[in-house]
Image (cartoon, rainbow, N blue to C red):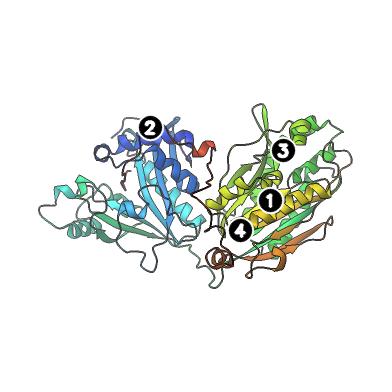
Amino acid sequence: MSNKKPHPLTLREATREDIPAMVELNKVAYPLLAEENVVWGERHLLSHQRVFPQGQIVAEMDGQLVGAVASLIVDLGPDPLRHHTWSGITDSGYFTNHNPAADTLYGADVCVHPEYRSQRIGAALYEARRQLCRRLNKRRILAGGRLWNYQDHAERMPPEEYAQRVASGELRDLVMSFQLREGFALRSVMPNYLRDPRSRNFGSLMEWLNPDYQRPATGARKARLACVQYQMRKIKSFADFERQVTYFIEVAADYRADFVLLPEFVSVQLLSQEDALSPIEGIRRLATYEKRITSLMRRLATRHGLTIIAGSHPVAEGDKLHNVAFVCLPSGEVVGQPKLHITPNERKGWGISGGNTLRAIDTPKGKIGVLICYDVEFPEAARYLADQGAEILFVPFCTDNRQGYLRVRYCAQARAIENQIYVALAGNVGNLPDVGNLDINYGQAAVLTPSDFAFARDGIAAEADSNEETLLVCDVDLDDLHASRSDGTVTPRLDRRADLFRLVSLLPADAQPDGPADGPLGGQPGAE
């Protein structure tokens, strides 16, 4: 029992900066497993954050990392309760078998610092995992629990009897008893689950069924996209801007859209209510609206149950200014994707700097990526997202003439063909005479496809009339997309010459630690 007094507990998504502390936390929480070399290494945790960041949650108290959970989504086929090993179900601990379309959230690990146990930290982490399961509408959570106290009873009873006695309350087990209190049910005992002396390598298969689970509609896996061709016009207040944005989101919701794409710098309309400012002054003033913009978009996404790619907005980070697209999910989660490649005009006129993060984003309808305008003109960025599993690429853009628009459009079409993904475009139209550096616009929303028999002729699923305010609504078939990757007339994803060319990411999130190679790891610990 710790002598520490309870302090406020904070749960949040793990970051790369947390990784060294998470490695040490795992070793301190499970010293026997550390001796067996079956605890996390930095490469494992980096892989977790890359493939499924929402599933990696840490607990902080007084600025110290005191607990963590690691989860992934797995496809267990027609028999979700089949026996498995820890290494097999987690792809040797790297989670590279994570499948966002599957229906089972797997609890790979939970640990709490020994000095902070008995403060309900483990319970809080389990609740966070249940909330994630509900938000993602997954059918169940599975976890393989270590039979923590089985070594004390192994000479008198088989593991199945031990597990049943714990389940009935006759015996107590540090891990299983905790999981039972958290609403999990014992389904079976798995041999050779994890190399662990305390449990004699046995593991209990525990299941929690999501009471709010909604069975997906049968048939083709489709998504409805709504691309807003947004008219720039002078406004008098933030309320005017909110009304215009809300109108389009509500219309998209009436059409039962799954995604709504707004244009790059859609929020620059707010500067029309200000006195004339220089471009630098204007963009800095616009950055002060960040919280109001994200609050509005989050509220609309949760109210209507759809995913909003909220165009882009300038974000101040210290003395730097980034151009960031906010992806607002129906769960209320907001993911920021900065623009990576900055045009000469953006650098000179606004002082904008390029970001250095890029990730595919899990949504209820599939995995997506976002590249802002100029970013789509660089093939490696789209290839990176496609390799991370993105099925739809959203490109909010802002161009002032036909040549600029066609650069974005032609490159977007190329990205759709070479990566066999859908690409959606949305831009501004109209003009703002008193707003420096963004006074005129040229735009034409479109949804582009690979070029093959399964898709629309010319590789264009839909396109709007140019320079007219409108909402483009289009359905895309994700099953057709995957079928074309293996059975299309050409199969560019399969026919790459990896012996000649390869994509090497230098993104900070992909930088490999300098430490020794990670060995096997594991543990489904339990802690209160």
Can residue 435 be seen in this snapshot?
yes
Task: Mark yes or no: residue 303 visible.
Answer: no
* Label number found at residue 395: 1
Query: What amino acid is at disc 2?
Result: Gly
User: Which mark sits nearer the N-terminus, 4 or 2?
Assistant: 4
Mark 1 touches mark 3? (CB < 8 Å)? no
Q: State the residue at coordinates (44%, 44%).
A: 47
Calculate the distance from the C-alpha at mark 4 to the C-alpha at mark 3: 33 Å
Q: Where is residue 516, by image quadrant?
A: top left
Amino acid type shown at disc 1: Val
Residue farthest along the front direction in this orientation: 500
Q: Name the residue under label 2.
A: 515
Q: Identify the secondary structure beneath mark 1.
A: strand
Q: Which mark is residue 289?
A: 3
Image marks 4 and 3: residues in contact by CB distance under 8 Å = no
Mark on residue 421?
4
Q: How far apart are marks 1 and 4 (CA)?
A: 13 Å
Report crowding for label 1: few under 14, some 14 to 19, many 20 or more residues within 10 A (C-alpha).
Answer: many
Q: Where is residue 488 in the image (x, y as percent from the top left)?
A: 57, 67
Circle 3 SS class: loop
